[in-house]
Image (cartoon, grey):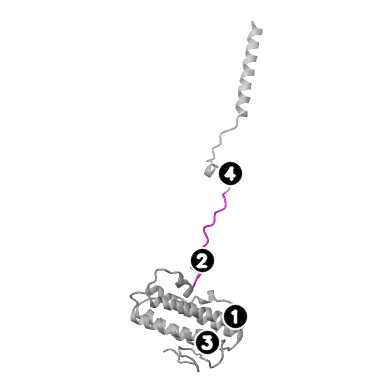
């Protein structure tokens, strides 16, 4: 009888021991919050970069105006003075690189007059003029021939810009007069660049037809 009771106690002790060991071997439940997005790792993924900025945002002056389909007087004045800033800075850079060469000297001086004419329009129409950011948009020329080609392209774009501005309905008369005057000056500049900068052959700073330095715009 005592033997049976001892056997039963031994058996019960073994069962309790097995249950305790089994409970210890179970994987404990994690109290940590689940990883985001259902992932098993908390390591953050690299941020995805946004789309590249619009290439049109990098355009300046006449190039930017050509892409704008909703022109206003405010926009036209901003595009116009930016393009005159650009022409002035571009021609001054060429002079620094190649020396006092014509027609760049006369035309660079004329750009200051063009800018002043536009500044008057900003004042009369109570519009704040933009900062001169032309230096960020200059183009390099490896030779005087390339410099002249840059001048031709710049004046052609300038002429086309003013032509489009002059076609806008409701354009104020004072803006129309200045845009027309500046376009005429750009036609003279274009002719000078196309002639290759021959001194005294219509390379003036104003819209004169040739034969001399041409009148400075007032």
Q: Secondary structure at mark 2?
A: helix
Residue under pointer 4: 41
Residue placed most toward the observer, 131 or 79? 79
Label 4: how many Cα within 10 Å (few below 14, some 14–19, many 20+):
few
Please name the residue that numbered disc 2 is placed on: 55
Quadrant of the snapshot with the N terminus: top right
Residue identifier under label 3: 192
- Queried whether the magenta region covers residue 178, the answer comes back as no
Per the rendering, the mark at residue 35 is none
Name the residue located 40 percent from the left edge and 81 percent from the top edge. 179
Q: Give the structural element (helix, strand or loop) at label 1.
A: helix
- Label 3 – label 2 distance at C-alpha: 32 Å
Q: Are marks 1 and 4 in contact (CB under 8 Å)?
A: no
What's the magenta region?
Answer: 44-60
Distance between the alpha carbons at the discs numbered 1 and 4: 58 Å
User: Residue 128's quadrant in the figure?
Assistant: bottom left
Label whose residue precedes the other's in the sequence (3 or 1): 1
Whichever of callouts 1 and 4 sits on the residue coming sooner in the sequence is 4
Question: Which label belongs to residue 146?
Answer: 1
- Check disc 3 and report its element: helix, strand or loop: helix
Q: Point out the tag, 2 or 4, that comes first from the N-terminus.
A: 4
Q: CA distance from mark 3 to mark 1?
A: 15 Å
Callout in the foreground (3, 2) = 3
The vertical placement of 16 against 39, above or below, is: above
CA gap, disc 3 and disc 4: 69 Å
Q: Which image quadrant: the C terminus?
A: bottom left
In terms of depth relative to the viewer, which is nearer, 7 or 136? 136
């Amino acid at each position: 009888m005592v033997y049976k009771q001892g056997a039963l106690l031994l058996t019960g002790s073994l069962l309790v021991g097995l249950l305790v060991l089994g409970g210890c071997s179970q994987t404990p439940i994690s109290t940590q919050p689940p990883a985001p997005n259902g992932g098993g790792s908390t390591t953050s993924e690299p941020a995805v970069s946004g789309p590249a900025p619009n290439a049109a945002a990098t355009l300046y002056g006449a190039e930017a105006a050509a892409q704008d389909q909703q022109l206003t007087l405010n926009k036209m004045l901003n595009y116009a003075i930016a393009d005159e800033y650009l022409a002035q800075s571009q021609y001054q850079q060429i002079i620094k690189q190649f020396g006092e060469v014509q027609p760049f000297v006369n035309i660079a001086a004329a750009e200051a007059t063009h800018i002043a004419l536009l500044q008057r329009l900003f004042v009369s129409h109570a519009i704040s003029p933009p900062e001169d950011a032309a230096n960020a948009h200059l183009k390099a020329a490896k030779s005087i021939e390339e410099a002249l080609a840059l001048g031709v392209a710049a004046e052609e774009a300038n002429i086309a810009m003013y032509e489009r501005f002059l076609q806008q309905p409701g354009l104020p008369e004072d803006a129309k007069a200045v845009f027309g005057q500046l376009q005429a000056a750009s036609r003279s500049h274009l002719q000078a660049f196309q002639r290759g900068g021959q001194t005294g052959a219509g390379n003036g700073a104003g819209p004169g037809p040739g034969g001399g330095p041409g009148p400075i715009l007032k």
